[in-house]
Amino acid sequence: MPIIHSTRHERMKYGDIKLYAGTACPELALRISTHMGIALCDRDIITFPNDNLFVKLHSSVRGQDCYVIQTTSAPVHRNLMELLILLQTLRLDSAARITAVVPYLCYARSDKKDQPRIPITARLVADMIEVAGADRYMTLDLHAGQIQGFFSIPGDVLSAFYNIVDYFKAKRSSLKNPVVVTADLGFAKKGRNYAVALDAPLAFIEKRRLSNDARAQALTLIGECQDRDVIIVDDEVDTGGSIVQAVNLVKERGARDVYVSFIHPVLSANAAERLSVLPVNEFVTTDTVPIGPEKLKLFGGRLTTLSIAPLLGEVIARANAGRSVGELFNE
């Protein structure tokens, strides 16, 4: 009788959906669970006195289709290790398929060697996720598209673009001659998609380094915003420096009301403080990264957070059923 060499996927049949969550984004995980009508599975995540992590599942996942929901924002290394240990725990318990659901992927800016003697850490993170046991991954709005190529496993790279566009479409009639402005030229291509969807012109902030230091200065606005409402768009706000420069520049150029939209609210260091004092009517973001109550309070009701839970919940359901994800976006 011949020996049949089958792959792991061929040997196993995907079973029921099992949702697991780390400690990085419990509110988002609960929203996904509620949207899908599937309870989060119980697990223990314990920190030992030596700062080592321990994970234990409360029930078997043998033959099941498992999804680990864990964003990798600050504290980055704890959240990343939680994700990796959860993935390995599921694999060792013989899950049929394991998907890492990572709304915000850490180290995404370290995607190339643009200086001598530096790492490509985004590739390292992709390798670790795969080695830990993930068969698939899901994430949103990667800083650079080429990061998809760092993974050898299949995945769904989604976007909150539609969430944000739909929100501003609902406000479109109340905006005066709106113009979409990108915070830098690197976001120009994606900014064009916002402008087309909102039927608005596009303008760009040009930034250039004037000296050999870490700061880039916004020098000029390519486009017109005089007596117009401005929607500044970006993918991620970390320290907030680019947004501060962009808001100040469009105001100097005669902008009326200013709206700032970004997908990943990393808001490290004093970014929330810097943004909260800007002459901005409204900040619009998503829940890929949780925002603490202290930071929320600084915005005084001017921060709108759109949930990506329905999107992730629908994609998880489609992945389990073997249905097209592109159909969601008419692709």
Image: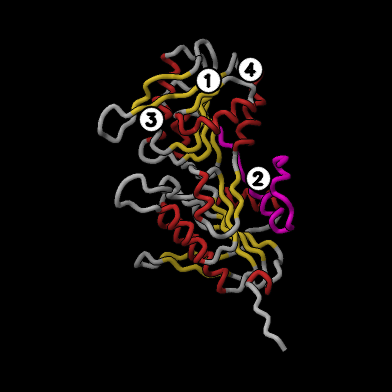
Q: Amino acid at mark 2?
A: Leu
Which is closer to the viewer, label 1 or label 3? 1
Image location (x, y in percent) of residue 52: 39, 66
Q: Is residue 214 above or below residue 279?
A: below
Q: For the point 49% across and 14% down, which residue is it?
A: 255
Measured as percent of width and height from the top left, residue 201 is found at 58, 19
**Mark positioned earlier in the residue sequence (4 or 1):** 4
Q: Using a 10 Å C-alpha cutoff, classify the residue at mark 4 as few (fewer than 14 neighbours), some (14 to 19) or many (20 or more).
A: few
Q: Compared with residue 42, is residue 168 higher up or lower down, i.e. above or below? A: above
Name the mark nearer the viewer: 2 or 3.
Answer: 2
Disc ID at residue 174: 4
Circle 3: element type: helix
Extent of the magenta region: 303-331
Tag nearer the camera, 4 or 1? 1
| Mark linked to residue 311 | 2
Q: Position of residue 194 (x, y in %)?
A: 59, 29
- Asked if the magenta segment contains residue 330, the reply would be yes
Q: Residue furthest front?
A: 2
Q: Work out whether mark 4 precedes mark 3 in sequence or the reverse, and give the earlier one.
A: 4
Left or right, 162 with reference to 116: right
- Specify how the rendered protein is coloured: secondary structure
Residue 230's disc is 1
At 26% from the left and 34% from the top, the residue drawn is 213
Looking at the picture, tell me which residue is in the foreground, 53 or 301.
Answer: 53
Assign a secondary structure to mark 1: strand
Q: Is disc 2 in contact with disc 3, using a CB cutoff of under 8 Å?
A: no
* Amino acid marked by disc 3: Arg
Give the CA separation, mark 4 to mark 1: 12 Å
Q: Is residue 106 magenta?
A: no
